Image (cartoon, rainbow, N blue to C red):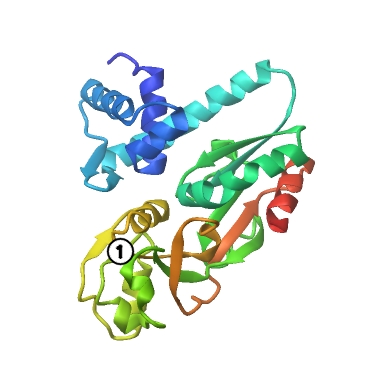
Amino acid sequence: MRLPNLNALRMFDAAARHLNFGRAAEELHLTQGAVAQQVRRLEADLGHKLFHRHARGLTLTDTGRSYHAPVRQALALIREATDHLAPAVQRVTLSVPPSFASKWLVPRLPEFEARHPGIDLRIVAEESLTDFKQGGIDIAIRQGGKPQESSLNSALLSLVDLVAVAHQDSALTNEVSPDLTDLAQHTLIQDGHRHWDLLLRQQGLTATGRVLQFNQTALAMDAALNGQGIALVPRIFLGSQPLAELWQAPRLGDQGFYVLWPSTQGRAKTVVDWLLRQ
């Protein structure tokens, strides 16, 4: 079997990290169709299906999952080897969930670049917790409970304060102080964290309206912006978007956004300090 095309492997890697052809295309500055086509060709060349296609995203097949790990490692080695040929720079690679990247981090990057022009900050958008060494990652941000990894430094960036939101022009905004029972009668938009399911189950409630399911919070927010229903999202993602807050969810223990890093090397610590000041 001949070796696959390197560009096809890059597109497969991006699609596997985002579990979405559109988000992979944005990262690679390509069209969604181009990414999907290259992945289909790669599957044909390999003779194996790498993804299950769904209406609102992708999931890796067992073959795709086992293939992605060494492919990602190989691409990281190629990048590292190429970087050694380039002039020395203060380069830091930050791994973040895709929705955190688009809704929180990207709007703040101009301020970081202005404050730290000597640091080349590279963003890798991915859901899973990475292997820092093999993935070439200096810092990671992850959503979940307080990290327990003893080999990593960690710091809380923000607790997850969930708010129910809808488009500010939605008729839902006319309801006075709706509670969870009221919201459950409308169309709910749920992301991969399935917080609606959790909160309704805790209160012994069932959604009587439709439930739209997306695999990423950013997509759920986009659906709410389009007036498709009520999304339950972290408050820190809202920014200046035209979304109206309808309800504040109870806090989920120590669930938060945590910064993780394996060392205190100077350039990485500078980025960590900046993140924690935001």
Name the residue tied to disc 1: 229
Relative to 150, residue 57 above or below: above
Horizontal side of residue 270 vs 246, given as left or right: right
The residue positioned 36% from the left and 17% from the top of the image is: 5
Label 1 Cα crowd, 10 Å radius (few <14 / some 14-19 / many 20+): many
Q: Residue furthest bottom?
A: 204
Residue 228 in the image, given as x and y percentages of width and height:
28, 59
Figure quadrant of residue 205: bottom left
Horizontal side of residue 30 vs 141, given as left or right: left
Residue 226 in the image, given as x and y percentages of width and height:
33, 54
Residue 23 in the image, given as x and y percentages of width and height:
40, 39
Horizontal side of residue 171 vs 79, given as left or right: left
**Count of numbered tags:** 1
- Closest to the observer, 237 or 224: 224
The residue positioned 31% from the left and 55% from the top of the image is: 214
Quadrant in the picture for the C terminus: bottom right
Q: Residue furthest right?
A: 266
Quadrant in the picture for the N terminus: top left
Residue 242 in the image, given as x and y percentages of width and height:
46, 58
Three-letter amino acid code at the position of disc 1: Gly
- Closest to the observer, 252 or 180: 180
Figure quadrant of residue 79: top right
The residue positioned 58% from the left and 48% from the top of the image is: 105
Relative to 220, residue 38 above or below: above
- Closest to the observer, 119 or 168: 168
Q: Secondary structure at mark 1?
A: loop
- Closest to the observer, 189 or 169: 169
Relative to 183, residue 149 above or below: above
Q: Residue furthest top?
A: 2
